[in-house]
Amino acid sequence: AISMRYAFSHLLKLKGLWLVGLAMLGYSGSIQGILGYLPLHLRDVGWPWVSADGAQTLFHAMSLAFVVPITFLSDRLRVRKDVLLVTIGLTLVGTGLLVFADGWLVWLAVILMGLGRDASMALLYTLGIQTKGVGATFAGTATGFISFFSFVGSLIASPIGNSLAGFGAGVPFIFWAALIGLAIASMLLIRPASALRSTLEPDPSQT
């Protein structure tokens, strides 16, 4: 039996887990902010209500369609970090397009952002569990640790981004793109070896 106090004190020492948490904060926060703002933004620039809400529907449809193929590919190739960098990078491109995009470019941006959403969230949690020093023993606590960063990102990203709309309708997307940049920077600092550990592989520090 491991006490919660010991589990947290152990996980707080793991740099790799903090990096995964920061990546989750930036990614999850940006997505929540964009999803809340995008339909209103599209209506303000003259889109019909059905089309504006349809963009959000397309986002979720793409996420649902690609979550299994992307996660399956990462398991087969055992390159979760690289897959995450690609999917989060596509989200950054899509968010950048929304700063000035209209018409079909908006649909392209939504597709780029949506196709990796659920897969990226799942892979970030998996990457956290597979961080050296976590393993099966601390998997549950590590999941909660990462979820904390997700909730913080979702809490602060929307109001901060929305408050920037007074400087221009596309400015909030610049802020959310910066959060995605934080996620990518955090991912780049994670050692590749931590992305290849098996969740059932015993950690030498725990034996």
Image (cartoon, rainbow, N blue to C red):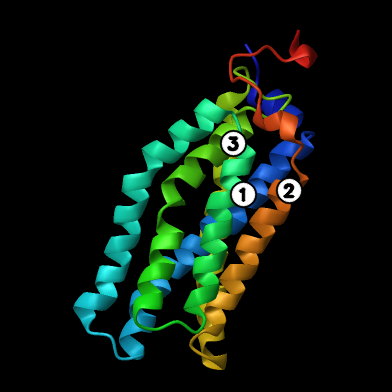
The residue at the point 58 percent across, 45 percent down is: 84
Q: Is residue 2 above or below residue 16?
A: above
Q: In the image, is 57 to the left or to the right of 76? A: left
Q: Is residue 143 above or below residue 27?
A: above
CA distance separating discs 3 and 2: 12 Å
Earlier sequence position, callout 3 versus callout 2:
3
CA gap, disc 3 to disc 1? 9 Å
Residue marked by disc 2? 188
Label whose residue precedes the other's in the sequence (3 or 1): 3
Q: Quadrant of residue 139?
A: top right
Inspect the image, locate mark 1, and give the three-letter code of the amino acid beneath it.
Answer: Leu
- Find residue 93 and report its image quarter: bottom right
| Circle 3 SS class | helix
**Foreground of the two, 22 or 68:** 68
Disc 1 target residue: 85
Q: Nearer the viewer, residue 83 or 32?
A: 83
The residue indicated by pointer 3 is: 80
66 displayed left or right of 162: left
The kind of residue on which mark 3 rests is Arg
Most foreground residue, 33 or 173? 173
Kind of residue indicated by mark 2: Leu
| Element type at mark 1 | helix
Residue at 46% across / 36% down in the picture? 71
Task: Say what secondary structure mark 2 lies in.
Answer: helix
